[in-house]
Amino acid sequence: MMNSAHIPILGVTMGDPGGIGPEVCAQALALPEINKICRPLLIGDLAPMQRAIDACGLSIGLRPCHTVENARFAAGTIAILEMKKLSATDLRLGTETALQGEASFCYVAKAIELALAERIHGTVTGPINKAAVNLAGHHYAGHTEIYADLTRTRDYAMMLAEGQFRVAHVSTHVSLREACDRVKMARVQRVIQLTHEALRRMGLPAPRIAVAGLNPHCGEGGLFGTEDREEIAPAVLEANRQGIQVEGPLPADTVFCKMKGGMFDAVVVMYHDQGHIPTKLTGFTYDHEKGTWLQMAGVNITLGLPIIRTSVDHGTAFDIAGKGIANPQSMVEAIKMATQLATGCRFLSI
């Protein structure tokens, strides 16, 4: 095990206090395996976290702090940077409120601030409710856009990873009609580059990337659309000229099977559902009889940022909030991924 001074400090945001974010954070941060690989600093509020600990039946305490410097990391406790944004009386489990949206936004903004100031080595985000954040007056489509704005990042992309199954998106939180309009050569080429850089950082020296087509059968020679031959194919050709090992456009109905079979290390997809559906089909398992998720595997990674950001690959699950049955698997994997990415960075003497 690494010396504690060289174990990365990760800012872990609690997510929306009314959702399952506090519960998955509590369960993940209670695991000895997590505390052996990183120093997790929870960013949130005491009341919802204590409520989550009790709901999950955990024997673990909260150790509040007001700065990174006075945080104390010890077995059996969770170091929490107390934001004082939400009290016990403000908590509304399973409901979107402006107060909870404001709190969850502030947790994220604080994590970004600390990472940009190099006080922490990476950030991991719990699930937020987009409607609640917008109710609070912060008009963003999601975490990815918040991070891009607050870090002043222009070129960025969302990657979902579940083991060796990885997808990077040309567009995410826009209408399907707008997503088609965003399939342009320059954007596709940039996402290929960001994907290549990310895979190398994950330890793959010669990544193999596939690019999914937009239209059925990649347009069938223009019969079903021209974007594949006019925008995607030239982007792939230019990426190859730059020394990136990439193929495409390939039909979206088979390219994921090829990646799952080991042919590719990642697929660049054109829009949100084209990438989210196969990844969640691979990583998620729902048991209708038990009314719970048996598996919630997968990590959300924002590419192109000046700081590290990983996240759970699921939402706030208001319907089960407070029941203590939320599956922490995605949070555990997000923390492990952030640790992997952070260990390639220089460490600070904190």
Image (cartoon, rainbow, N blue to C red):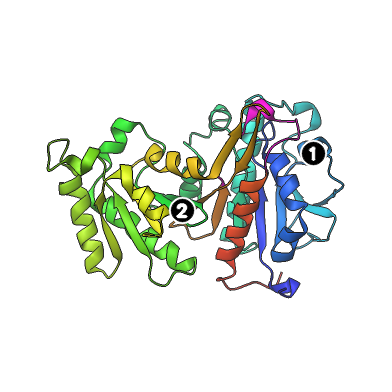
Residue drawn at point x = 40 percent, y = 43 percent: 275
Report the front residue among 83 and 195: 195
Residue 272 screen position, x and y as percent: 40, 39
Asked which quadrant contains residue 328, the reply is top right
Residue 263 screen position, x and y as percent: 36, 60
Q: Are marks 1 and 2 in contact (CB under 8 Å)?
A: no
Residue 236 screen position, x and y as percent: 24, 58
Mark 2 is surrounded, within 10 Å at the Cα level, by few (under 14), some (14 to 19) or many (20 or more) other residues, namely: many
Q: Which mark is residue 150?
A: none
Q: Main secondary structure of the magenta part?
A: loop
Relative to 291, residue 262 above or below: below
Residue drawn at point x = 24 percent, y = 38 percent: 216
Relative to 288, residue 212 above or below: below
Q: Quadrant of the N terminus?
A: bottom right
Q: Quadrant of the C terminus?
A: bottom right
Residue drawn at point x = 43 percent, y = 57 percent: 304
Residue 342 screen position, x and y as percent: 58, 66
Disc 1 versus disc 2: distance between alpha carbons?
30 Å
- Give the secondary structure at mark 1: loop
Residue drawn at point x = 31 percent, y = 37 percent: 179
- Residue tagged by mark 1? 56
Amino acid under label 2? Phe
- Residue tagged by mark 2? 165
- Give the secondary structure at mark 2: strand
- Please report the bounds of the magenta region as a residue range: 312-327
